[in-house]
Image: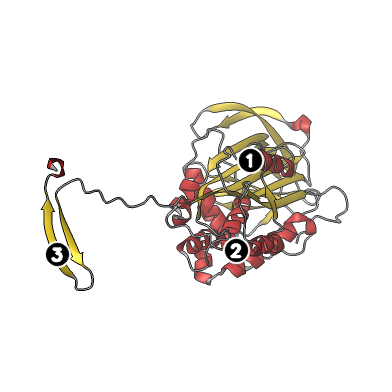
Amino acid sequence: MSACGPKSMSPGMSAVSAASFGLFMGSLSGTSSPQGCFMSPLSIVYALSLALNGAGPHSSTHAELLRVIAGPAGQQQGLTESDLNSELARALTLLNGQCTGGLAGPSSEMYLANSLWTHKGTQLKQAYVGSMESLFQATAREATNGAKDINAWVAGATRGMIKDLIMTDDFIAVLANAIYFKGLWKHAFKSESTHTRDFTTSSGEVKQVSMMQQLFKPPGNAITGVQKKGLYDAVSLPYKGDAFSAVALLPAEGVDMSTALKDWAAGPQKFTPLRDVKLIMPKFKVATAISLKPVLQSLGVESAFSPGAADFSRMVDFGAFVSDVVHKAVVEVDEEGTVAAAATGVVMMRCLPAPPEEIIFNRPFAFMIYHNPTDLPAFIGVINDPSAA
């Protein structure tokens, strides 16, 4: 039991959690950074939900976005937009401090914010703006200085950890989410116990890194974990206040990360107390910047990115489509705890009117003159070479 009460997850949130792992696994397979990959599926889900609520309710755009947010489990449950909105609105309240507020002593800090940005001259429908403000506490603002204004908001919301999320001024709107977390370990590591040790990277290279270590022994500083022989070992490290915890998962030798994570995501996992465990893990800082467009397309989101098929008729009075979904995240772990931040931007553009169809009479053609009242052809001809005239 945590300080927030017993752990419980509704079927809807369970489905979103599973879908979040799907988003991460899709991104992981497309990331080649030697550092690794770190993301906030939660940030992505809220940003995509801002787009979902602007999509035409019976459109393929809406169906595809709903499918990727709710995931396969959500489809089986028949989760609707209204269901997801209720669940995510409730989660937003909890994440933004209900669990950590009022706890004795230092506790974890979580801040999650949503915003709707428009280019000068662009108007979002008031019903849409009001709904997003009510559900997701989203603020609507005009980006008078283009991307600079959005990036300043993101930097402020993430305590300066995420900068330059949006790299273009070519947009009519940006639906943005930012998330920040800071947590102090409930059982801090001692800096004097940190030493340099070997770490074998994913490429097989052995590097020297700073490794923290601590003996966890009940009853004073007991921890829980999940140990699946031949698959992985996982430990849960609580932060002060008990509202949040970190899970570090180590695949067994010879088991690839995707296999271990797929098993983990299939949960729920049963944590049990670990007795007399000496935990040795590195200090680290990892940052990721990624376009989610190919990931989302691989998961079935197609029409939202297509100028000819996108339907965001609940958001704007004109044709609009998503040009990109950008995501940045960073995490830093040391002896005292963890700081992490992420931001997601759904970049919207106006659909240009389709070019007029051209019919070019540049080869032999027939030419007729009709009398309209009687529909009689008064003249009929074939033009093979107009240059001779």
Few, some or many residues within 10 Å of mark 2 (<14, 14–19, 20+) = some
- Nearest the eye: 170 or 264: 170
Asked if labels 3 and 2 touch by Cβ distance under 8 angstroms, the answer is no
- Taking the image as drawn, is residue 370 in sight? yes
Dot 1 or dot 3, earlier in sequence: 1
Dot label at residue 14: 2
Q: In which quarter of the image is the N terminus?
A: bottom right
Q: In which quarter of the image is the C terminus?
A: top left
Scheme of image coloration: secondary structure
Q: Residue at the spot x=79%, y=59% of the render?
A: 98
Q: Name the residue under label 1.
A: 146
Residue at 57% in and 58% down: 316
Mark linked to residue 37: none
Choose the circle earlier in sequence order: 2 or 3: 2
Assign a secondary structure to mark 1. loop
Badge 3 is on which residue?
A: 378
- Viewer-nearest residue: 293 or 32: 293
Mark 3 Cα shell of 10 Å, populated few (<14), some (14-19), many (≥20): few
User: x, y (%) of residue 379?
Assistant: 13, 61
Q: Where is residue 30 in the image (x, y as percent from the top left)?
A: 47, 42
Tell me which amino acid carries mark 2. Ser
The secondary element bearing badge 2 is classed as helix
